[in-house]
Amino acid sequence: QHPYSCDLELQFASPKHAQVAADALAVDQEMSPKSVSRTFTTDGCTMKLHVEAADARFLRLTMLSFFDMSAVVVKTLQEFGGEQEGGAATR
């Protein structure tokens, strides 16, 4: 249990896109697994991320990395996902 945390939700066009995104993003291992933990879950069209970190710097770096990688996933799903309305929006 770490003292700093963040919860984020991304809304996708379909439950399949949400699961593909969660699976793709969960593959990357943390550089400091003792200092940061990430949990990805899906609920219908929503992908949920819960991050806990030992300090604010680790939380910030983890979230910045997540935003960079999720942008690539969203663009890929929009281009190749096969849904009429691709994309994601944060809540």
Image (cartoon, grey):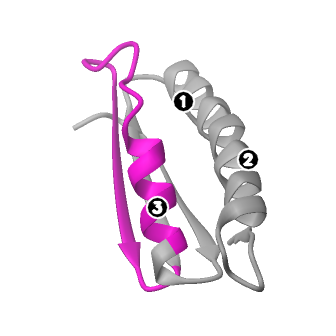
**Where are the magenta residues, as a range?**
17-45
Label 2 and label 3: CA atoms lie apart by 14 Å
Label 1 and label 3: CA atoms lie apart by 20 Å
- Residue 71: assigned label: 2
Task: For mark 3, give the secondary structure.
Answer: helix
* Left or right of 51, for residue 39: left
Among the 4 quarters of the image, the one containing residue 36: top left
State the image coordinates of residue 51 (x, y, percent, origin top left): 42, 44
- Residue 62: assigned label: 1
The reply to whether the magenta stretch includes residue 19 is yes
Label 2 and label 1: CA atoms lie apart by 14 Å
Closest to the camera, between mark 1 and mark 3, is 3
Task: For mark 1, give the secondary structure.
Answer: helix
Q: Mark 3 points at which residue?
A: 20
| N-terminal-most mark, 2 or 1 | 1
Amino acid type at image mark 2: Ala
